Each structure stands twice: as structure tokens, then as C-alpha cells.
Amino acid sequence: MSLSRRRFLALSAPAMMAFGRSAPQLFAQAANQSSEKDSDNILVVVQMSGGNDGLNTVVPHSHDEYKKARPTLAIAKDDVFSIDDDYGLHPELKGFADLLEEGRLGIIQGVGYPNPNRSHFESMDIWHTCFRKNMSRQDGWLGRAIDQVQEEASLDIPALHLGHQKQPFALTSLVHRVPTVKSLDQFRLEPLSQMTVPELQQGVRSERMEPASLLGFVQSSTENALDVAQRMLETTAGYQPSVTYPESPLAKDLKTIAQLIDSEFATRIYYVEIDGFDTHSEQALAHASLMKSVSESVTAFLNDINQHGHGDRVLVTCFSEFGRRVAENASKGTDHGTAAPMFLAGNAVQAGLIGEHPDLTNLDQGDLVFHTDFREVYAGILENWLNLESKAVLGGSFDPVSFLKNPLS
């Protein structure tokens, strides 16, 4: 059985620490890295905004109830990418089907939460914070995770939101600021004078103020920003993607993330969004286009980072705030519903269906009854991938969903 780098470090760290100053420098560095608790794992969150139709994403083609409820929208067995005898992936999810075939896609079925809220804003708010609106919610679940990461290792940018949208509440931290950038061009400084970035850095450092003073704080913040900008310029300049990305905003954002990962930035959490899943009318074509965009973009990203040697430390998760109702409406669309599948993709993922599909004969006022609480998925990501304590982040104890081939791989 092969011994992964992380497994080796976890086993060897105590022994290396015992050597103290006599340990070879290489091993001492390895031990120190190990003490940072798997700090090289990266999470990429893809938010599918609008309420994705889970039933036409992971299609229960053999279920009569599905076909009866959707006379125009039901997708036939012959058109899907087969998962097993009962379920298949949407015809535009070819990239995901390839990932599944390669053992790099896990599908968690029927994800939701008790007493579902069908409001886009409130439901997304619940997914972002893990709390209902009548509870105190000053930060998001990833913001709280960032605070734990920062306690263990000094990261210049612990998390990053890519895109033109408002920063998601999930990234809100009471301690750290998470930047939102539209593109890497935003990091390219355009000084009002003819000074270069190194000259600006030298100017900021020339007269050091007391760190506790307001000017000292501004000086330190400016210095950090200039350092990050300079590193961005230096380390991302030579990046060449190993695949051809599709022409879409989501693919562009994911390509930027691949560039940053390859540049060895210590950022552990990246967040991107794709909108348009609120398909109340004429759903078929719109949903197909969205499926194609998500599938092709995520697959290109994973193949790119894999070929650059980072595939083993990157996990992608795709979620939406709720699914759609089981029955289609009179406008050949679907209205706001409840449970839907989540996707987890990457080299370390256990491939295939995870958990049970909601029972199509046991509905709650026409909606699916969720099988897996989304906070159980979060607990699995926090504890088994980011190696963080989940209880403080989630505001309670939730059984972590097992989704990795080997938790120590």
C-alpha cells in the first residue's frame, strides 16, 4: 500500500519533533508542515444560484412518479449518462459523467434541511450561515472556518471570492477580511505617479510607525497589499493552462483559481458563483445550458490543476439553495422546492452516489423530503478535508458525511 505525503508526515511528525535541533533541516520542515494539520488542502465552492432542479440533474428515469409528474420535462433513460439502473446524469453533464467514470465525482443525494424555506434569500442565508434568521448571524460558515485556519497558519489571503457578484455571506468573518475580485487584473496596481511597485513598497517601509497606532495599522495593511500584488504579478505571469476552458464567466473564474493555486498562494478556500437556476418557465433549454456550463467548467478546471500536479489537494463542491418541486408547472418549468443533490469532485473523492435518493412516493405537500442535512456535508468537508473542528463552525454537532476514498490520502 502506498504511503501518501500527508500520511507520511502525520506519522513521522512526532518523531521528527523529538530530534529537536539535531533533526536534518528537511525533516524539521516536514514536521512543521505536518503540525499545520493538512494545511495544503484546498476547497473550491461553486454556488449554483436560483434553486437547481435536482430531479433533472440526477434523473430518476425509471420511476413512474417522476415521469407522471413531468409530462414535458422528464428526461428519458436513453438520453441520460447512466449512473446505475435507476438514475442517470442530465444529457449535458458529459464532463461530470467522465469524472464519475474516472472515479473523481461523488453525488450526495437529497440534501436539504428541516422546515425548508423556499425564499431564495432566506434559504441561501441558511446555507451560508447554518442558522435561521431568528438567530444571531454575524458571520458565515466559511468565515468561521477561516478564523480556525488562521489560528494554525499565517495566510496572506485565507479565502478569495472570484466574480462580479456581491460577496456571499458564507465568507463573512468577524476577524479577517476576504477579498472579492473580478479578475487578476484587479491586483495590478496602477500608481498615480511613475513609481513602480517595488518603489512603493520601499516608500511604505521607509518610516516605520508603531504597530499599535492607526498609522502603523494603515502602514502594515498597505505593505501587505503591495506584497500580495507584487507576488501576484511575479508568480502568475508565466502560467499556461493545460486544457482549453469553455467560454463562460464560470470557466474564467475557475481558470483564475487554477492560476492562483499553481502560483503556490496559501489560500485554502475559493468561492465562485453561477446564476440563472430559477427556471419557472420553459426550463428545458435554460437548464441544459446551465448544466453544460457547470459540467464543462468544473471538469476543465479539475483536469487543468491535475496536469499541473495539484489534483490531490483540491476538492470542488457544487450546491444550490434548494431544489425544485417534483411536478412541473403550467409554463413548462418548475417552482421552488426542497431537497437536491450536491456534487463533490476531485481525485480524493469517493465516486458514485452517496446516501439515499428522496422517496418519490413520500412527498411533503408535493415536495421531496430531504435525506441528508447540508450541515452533515459541511461537517465532512471541515473535518475530513480541511481538518478543522466542525462543531464551533456549524453551531452544533453533525455527523460528517463520508465522501473520501481515504480520509488520510
Image (spheres, rainbow, N blue to C red):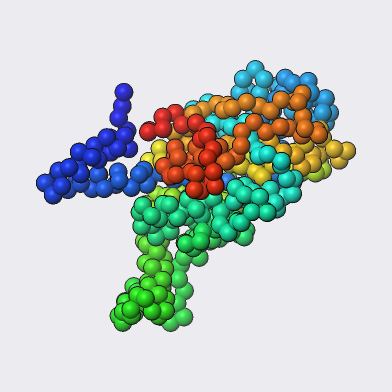
Identify the residue shown where x is 37% and y is 62%.
Answer: 231
| In the displayed structure image, the side of residue 241 where residue 282 appears, left or right | right
- Quadrant containing the N terminus is top left
Residue 231 appearing in the image: yes
Examine the image and state in which quarter residue 371 appears: top right
Residue 244 place in picture, x, y as percent: 51, 44
Examine the image and state in which quarter residue 5 appears: top left
Residue 310 place in picture, x, y as percent: 40, 42
On screen, 220 above or below 111? below
Residue 333 place in picture, x, y as percent: 81, 39
Identify the residue shown where x is 54% and y is 31%.
Answer: 106
On screen, 119 above or below 65? below
Residue 259 place in picture, x, y as percent: 44, 51
On screen, 282 above or below 108? below
Residue 288 appearing in the image: no
Q: Nearer the viewer, residue 279 or 300?
A: 279
Q: Nearer the viewer, residue 79 or 69?
A: 69
Question: Which residue sits furthest right?
Answer: 330
Q: Nearer the viewer, residue 393 or 360?
A: 393
Question: Which residue sits furthest left?
Answer: 22
Identify the residue shown where x is 68% and y is 48%.
Answer: 123
| In the displayed structure image, the side of residue 314 where residue 356 appears, left or right | right
